[in-house]
Amino acid sequence: MRGEPGIGLRSDRGPVLLSVMLSTGLVAIDSTILATAVPSIVADLGSFAQFPWLFSIYMLTQAVSVPLYGKLADIFGRKPMMLVGIAIFLVASALCGAAWSMLSLIVFRALQGLGAGAVLPIGQTIVADIYSLVERAKVIGYLASVWAVSSVVGPALGGIFSDYVSWRWIFFINIPLALLAMGMLQRGFTERLTRTSHRIDYLGAVLLSGGGALLILGLLAGGVNWAWDSPASIAVLGTAAVLLVLFGLVERRAPEPILPLWVFRRRVLIGSNATSLCVGALLIGLNSYVPLYAQNVLGTSAVVGGFAVAALTLGWPVAATLSGRIYLRVGFRNTALLGAALAILGGIVLVTVTPASGVWQLASGCAVIGAGLGFMSAPALVAAQASADWQTRGVVTGATLFARSVGSAVGIAVFGAVVNASVTAGGSAEHLPADVLATAIHGVYLGVLAVAVIAALCVLVMPGGVPAAEPAPEPSTVD
């Protein structure tokens, strides 16, 4: 053992925690950093109509690969798979920075998403491996703060690089940071892994990847790239359904299923995953439409509109940090119920927003919902991890994060349909008259409130009670 005892960044496990935080930060920033760089990228590479795929393809490949990496981490260990994920992200970042066309950049963003798909679930799993349940109640604040900082730093860095250097440095900056994260993990983290023979479920992996990718693609593109009742939409979603049904049949007979079906039968996992799905839907709904409402209805600047939605991500880490102390005393379910109640309260605040309201009312609704999400998401994930042993912890972590990604895709589809159903004038949402847009997005706020209520019902599925004490991990897991 080296360093000071405890859980801080200067403790013996500090380098591993810092590596996970740095890797997570890279992934989180790359989810938002492109938003302010789009004009520069389009001016350089052209193909304005294709640029939305820079965001969609990253989300799609990341989401689909999460459950696969979770299983592989249970088979081959967290460290090697985490290093593989960071390495893929690093190589993809270099390729993105060297992209010569919009199409090549989209392809390399897809590869970048595949790397990100390893970093998030395995990073969370490593934290669960090296910290006890009581310790994680404090450590969770470190990880939550990464997302809050990234949500603010990402767009700012994108604008700075685009205006003063080159948009390509949005990706090149990832290279030294990824190398640092890999070096810290390689040097500081040692696993005790018993090597046994495994029968990898290749067919299940292919079916899950294909079905999941088509499902998310259909939800992202429906009502945008094609009509919901068009042949393309029916073909994509129909094929997704067939592949996922076949996946379920294959998993029933696979010796080592890539995503065991017991994930869908355990009460704690059903409740946790359903809650995570709602969290994903709430996040995407607010991130997509709050800035639009602030700028085009309330008449604020882009910066003020960004701060309105930033209140969402600033309330999250504070609540997530506090949730650790609370769920040790009252249990995961009661803590998550507190979060659902706050999300409902925030939804009520948003529903009362009108074109005559101040932006502070919009921001306060987002802040309350953000606090609710922090109290919901952290207990849901930790409850899922606490129900599993080392051999299955990667699977349950991956399943919970995959559910959040699917929730985001469902949220895009549902909230987009709500807006489109309310729009009677032509043109895109950004160019609608303020009163028409206000009515359309008010429907989204009603939807957010409805999802918050559904989230409360999902939380009730989780078993109650105070979590049992967990033995501290063996110190030998950290060099």
Image: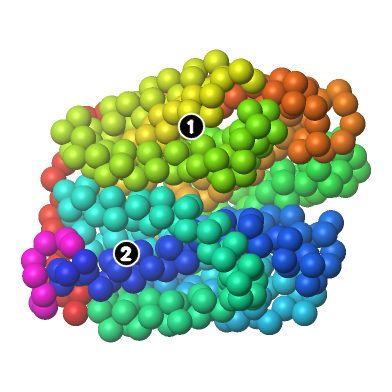
Q: Residue 456: percent from the left, percent from the top? A: 43, 24
Per the model, the C-alpha gap separating discs 2 and 1 is 34 Å
Q: Main secondary structure of the magenta part?
A: loop
Residue 297 locus on image (x, y percent): 68, 28
What percent of the width, then of the height, locates residue 290?
59, 35
Magenta part of the chain: 1-8
Residue at the spot x=18%, y=62% of the render?
Answer: 8
- Which amino acid type is marked by label 1? Ala
Circle 2 Cα neighbour tier, 10 Å, few/some/many (<14 / 14–19 / ≥20): many
Residue 82 lies, with reference to residue 25, above or below; the image says below
Residue 299 seen in this snapshot: yes
The residue that mark 2 highlights is 126
Q: Which residue is mark 1?
A: 363
Q: State yes or no: discs 2 and 1 in contact (Cβ < 8 Å).
A: no
Looking at the image, can residue 260 be seen?
no
| Left or right, 1 with reference to 230 | left
**Badge 1: residue crowd in 10 Å (few <14, some 14–19, many ≥20):** many
Secondary structure at badge 2 equals helix
In what quadrant of the picture does the C terminus appear? bottom left
Quarter of the image where the N terminus is located: bottom left
Amino acid at pointer 2 = Ile
Taking depth in this image into account, of 479 and 4 the one nearest to the observer is 4
Q: Mark 2 or 1 closer to N-term?
A: 2
